[in-house]
Structure formats: structure tokens, C-alpha cells
Image (cartoon, grey):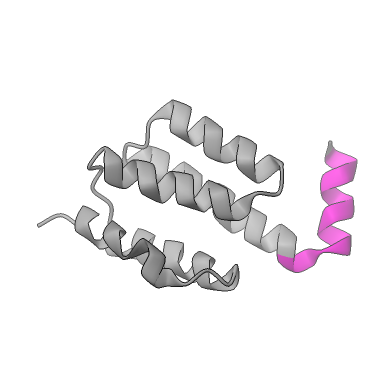
Amino acid sequence: MMVLSSLKRFLDPKGHELECRLSDLIERAVEFGLRSEDAASARELLEHNEGGLALDTVLTQLYEYSVPVDNNFIEDSLAIAVSMKIDPIAYKFIYEQLPK
């Protein structure tokens, strides 16, 4: 696995960076209260090169379970979406998770 990760980093540095950013976002979501089974699903999607679905899973489940997040988390999430060419408007609902 380590060899494959190193090879991927060499062959696709931008993809590797995005994968690292998504992995970090998942861990931060867990700290906010994302359920462990949802985090596991997002990690599995990420392992199978489904970054868009991983991001969608994280943000949707945080919203579904009314897990509060901070503005930095939202900004990072939307920046990741933009880097994957996903319209950030698709995730405008996540702003509802900011503490009132």
C-alpha cells in the first residue's frame, strides 16, 4: 500500500494533495461529531477514488444529523468542492450547521 501511495503521489501530485485534503476534512468532521459509520463510508469512497462522493457523504451527513461546524470547516469544504469542479452552491445547506 505504501508503494502505491508513493507512486500515486509521484504520478498525480494534485490528486494526491486533494486526497490528503479530503482525508483531513473527514477527520475534522469526526471531531465535530460525524458518526463513525459515515466517516468509514467516506474513507472507503476516497480509497476508491470517489472524492466527490466522499465529500458529499460528509457534508450531507453533518447536515442530516444537525452537527454544528465552524466557518473554517465550511470554507475548506467548499474550496475542495471547487477544486473538484463541483459547484459550491450544491452545498449551501452546510451553512445551516454554523452555531447560531
Number of numbered discs: 0
Q: Position of residue 16 (x, y in %)?
A: 73, 58
Q: Is residue 64 above or below residue 56?
A: above
Res 28 visible: no
Q: Whole-percent x and y of residue 52?
A: 57, 55
Residue at 22% across, 42% down: 66
Q: Position of residue 8 (x, y in %)?
A: 84, 54
Q: Is residue 92 magenta?
A: no
Q: Give the answer, above or below, for where 72 lies relative to 33.
A: below
Residue 4 covered by magenta stretch: yes
Q: Describe residue 75's horizontal placement relative to residue 95 as left or right.
A: right
Quadrant location, the N terminus: top right
Residue displayed at 23% across by 53% down: 97
Residue bounds of the magenta highlight: 2-14
In the picture, measured across the screen, residue 93 lies left or right of residue 43, that is left
Residue, x 87% and y 61% (percent of image)? 10
| Left or right: 51, with 35 as reference point | right
At a point 46% along the width and 26% down the height, the residue shown is 37
Q: Is residue 75 above or below residue 63?
A: below
